[in-house]
Amino acid sequence: MTNTLLSPLAHDYITALFGGLVPHEAAVRVDLTHRLTTSQSQLETWCVQVGTETPIAWTLWLEWPLVNSHLRDCNVLISPDACWPHCLSSQARQTVLDSGVALASFNRLEIAHDSPHAQKSGPIFERWPGQTWGAISAWAWSISRCVDALAHICGANTRMGVLGHSRSGKAALLAGATDTRIALTAAHNSGCAGAASFQSMGPGAETLQALQQTFPHWLGSACADPAVQARIQAIDNLPLLSAIAPRALCILQASDDLWANPMGTAATFEALGAVYKNAGAADQLHHFERTGGHPITPLDWQRVAQCLAKLG
């Protein structure tokens, strides 16, 4: 599912920075493999498969809050960060459920690895070898395919949001900009190639050059070219993030996480304010700031879940 309303500059930005988008050429299949009901929630385990001959498959955990022993009809928050127990802790999960929101989580590394050798690897690169796109585009694709899966499981009218932390925040923003079915997009400390402007660099902020040198597998193949990097910085992230409007957008930032460029994130939020105002959706743009460094906290989860719950 691609947002056909993307501007030419947004297309150029996606191509230059992320190497383009992964195709949605194959159908999604879902199979329920387990269900566990407790006094507070119902946890379902689903197998998601994309394609038939050489399918890409991963596990999707879907946890519903219970009210008086009955499932609650509610919105669903998607997290690709099940690979990080410190990120998606039991406290974080309970915070989401207590907000009256269901939580769908999956391990994005089952789709595209985050190799310590900084090489593109994993099932999606085996399925489509030699592609220009990197892991961020692959992770954004997997978020969108989870939207497909949840539409089968929950119904097409279910409101869905996505929350990504750090590198997953970059993927969440790309998914939100390119899949109009995502009602709320949230990125936490996403920094360079995420919510932070390239044109407003605070002290100690990660540069595009540093990102490409350390994590080249996240980005498009052409991003190693200084001329391409200059074009990315000239376009900046506003054309991409503007594609999310008028749908809800939550930008979460720790003011003392200098590497994630809080100054650049604030600049992006200010620029988006005019975009959302012109779209008649000023109340759908949120900027949450706190101290406490890079790790995502239960407060961050709570803020996003409450925003999603308010969408009705």
Image (spheres, helix red, strand yellow):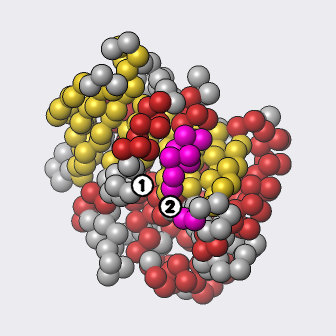
Task: Check the picture and name the quadrant holding the C terminus.
Answer: top right
Question: What residue sits 34% from the left and 32% below the top?
Answer: 63
Question: What residue sits 77% from the left and 62% below the top?
Answer: 267
Residue 212 locus on image (x, y percent): 51, 80
Residue 242 locus on image (x, y percent): 70, 51
Q: Secondary structure at mark 2?
A: loop
Judging depth in this view, the residue of 111 and 262 nearest the camera is 262
Q: Secondary structure at mark 1?
A: loop
Label 1 sits on what residue type? Cys
Figure check: 82 above or below 37: below
Label 2 sits on what residue type? Pro
- What is the distance, in whole Å, between disc 1 and disc 2 at their CAs? 7 Å
Question: What residue sits 63% from the left and 85% below the top?
Answer: 227
Question: Which residue corresponds to mark 1?
Answer: 87
The image shows a total of numbered marks equal to: 2
Question: Alpha-carbon neighbours of circle 2 within 10 Å: few (<14), some, or many (≥20)?
Answer: some
Residue 3 locus on image (x, y percent): 57, 45
